[in-house]
Amino acid sequence: MQAQRKPLKPLDEALRELLAQAQALPGTERVDTFDADGRVLLQDAVSPLQVPPQDNSAMDGYAVRTADWIDSGVDLPVSQRIPAGTSPEPLAPASAARIFTGAPVPAGADAVVMQEDCEVLEDGRVRIKARPRAGQWIRRAGEDIALGATVIAAGTRLTPAHLGLAASMGNARLQVARKPRVALFSTGDELVMPGTVAPQDMRPGSIYNSNRFFLRALLLRMGCEVTDLGIVPDDREATIAALARAAAGHDVIVTSGGVSVGEEDHIKPAVQRLGQLDLWQIDIKPGKPFAYGRVNRSEAGAGFAHFVGLPGNPVSSFVTFQVLVRPFLLRLQGVANVLPRGMPARADFALSKGDRRREFLRVRYNDKGGLELFGNQSSGVLTSAAWGDGVVDNPAGTTIAAGDIVRFIPFAELMA
Ligand code: AMP
Ligand code: MG
C-alpha cells in the first residue's frame, strides 16, 4: 500500500498562519541613533521643526533681489557677507550679499547668483553677468521635512538614510524593538564542522555543515541575536535536551534538517514531547517540508519559544528561510511590511516544463538587463544561491518562454 500523502499547503496560507503566531515581542529598547541601522522603529517619528529650518543658499555666490534688475549686467555694491551658520541682516536695497552654500538667505533677497556668473570689480562692487530668475539656487525652508510631518512611520525597519533623517529632526536616541533572541542548531549525524576534519580525512558519507553558516548570517541580517547550539545528533533524547535548553533563554528556535518523516527525523516527536508542532508540506520548490510549533519552557508560567524547523537540503533551507522565516522574524519586531517586493523582469531563458509546485528559480541579471537561469536547480546545489541575484517566483505549472515578463525577487530584498 502506498503511504498516504498529505496535501500540499500553499505558501500564502502557510505565511498567513505563521504570521498569525508572530505577536510583537514584549520589551523595547532606546538606542543611540548611531546604532539604529536595521532596527525597527516603534513610534512614529514626527518632526518638531521644518528641515531645512530656513531658506538657504544652494551655491556659493551672491544673494540679490530680482526686482532691482534693470538690465542684464548690473554692478552692485556688496552690502554684507553671510557664511553658513550666521544670521543675516535684511538685504540693503540695490545691493548684493556675498553668500555661501547652506547660509540663510537674507530677507528681501529672492535669488542667488552662483559665483561663476559674477565678477568682482576693482572698486569692490560685483558684476552680475547673468540675469537671475526669482527663486534660483534657493533651497526652501521645509522642502525636505514639514513641521509636524510623520517622517518615519512606526514599524519601519531603519536604513542608513532613516538614521540621517531621524538626526535631522533632532533625535539622538530612538525607541526600537528588542532583538529577537534566536537559538540555532543543525541536526544530522552526517554533519561535520569545517576546521575539525580536513577534507582528505572525511569519512565516507560525511559532509560539512553548510546550513549553519548561512542560517546564522541570515538571522543576524534579520536583526536577531543568535546563540549557535551546534550540531545535534539524530537521536530523540539528544534533540529533546537541545530543545529544552534552547527554549529557556530564547524567543525562537530555528533548526535545519530532520523535518521529514523518516525514522531518522526526530524533530517532530521531540518538539511534540515539549510542546506542539505542525509539520507542513509546503507547495513550493525548493523547500517542501517545514515545521512550526512551540516549545514550552520548563518553569511553570515561563511561556514558550517559537519553533521553526527548516529542511536540511541547503537550498530548501535557504529559500524557506527567506520566504517564511524572514517575514516571521520581522513581524516579531513589529515590522509592518514583511513581504518581499517582487518586480517584473524579462526572462532571457526558457522553462519548457513548469513544476507542479510554485517554484523559486535562482537567476541572475545578464548585461542585457534580462535574467539568466542557473543550470542546476537542484535543492542540494547551493552554488545556485551564491551565483544568483535573486529568484523568479514562478507559479505552479507555468512554462516560461524567452522574452516573457516574470516576477523577480532580488536577494537584496530577501536578505535585507
Ligand atoms: P534532512 O532534512 O535531515 O533529511 O536532510 C536532507 C539533506 O540535507 C541531506 O542530504 C542532508 O545531508 C543535507 N543536510 C542536512 N543538514 C545539512 C546541513 N546543516 N548542511 C548541509 N547539508 C545538510
Ligand atoms: Mg537529517
Image (cartoon, grey):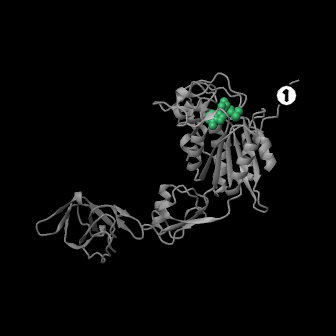
| x, y percent for residue 61 | 26, 63
| x, y percent for residue 372 | 53, 28
Give 232 or 156, whichever is nearer the viewer.
232
Viewed as shown, does residue 9 lie left or right of 131?
right
Q: Quadrant of residue 233?
A: top right
Label 1 is placed on what type of residue? Ala
Q: Residue furthest top?
A: 352
| x, y percent for residue 331 | 66, 54
Viewed as shown, does residue 100 lie left or right of 161?
left
Give 269 or 240, whichever is nearer the viewer.
240
Q: Quadrant of residue 101?
A: bottom left
Q: How many marks?
A: 1
- Specify the quadrant that holds the N terminus: top right
Residue at the image position 27 percent from the left and 62 percent from the top: 60
Which residue is label 1 attached to?
3
Viewed as shown, does residue 172 lie left or right of 315?
left
Q: Quadrant of residue 251?
A: bottom right
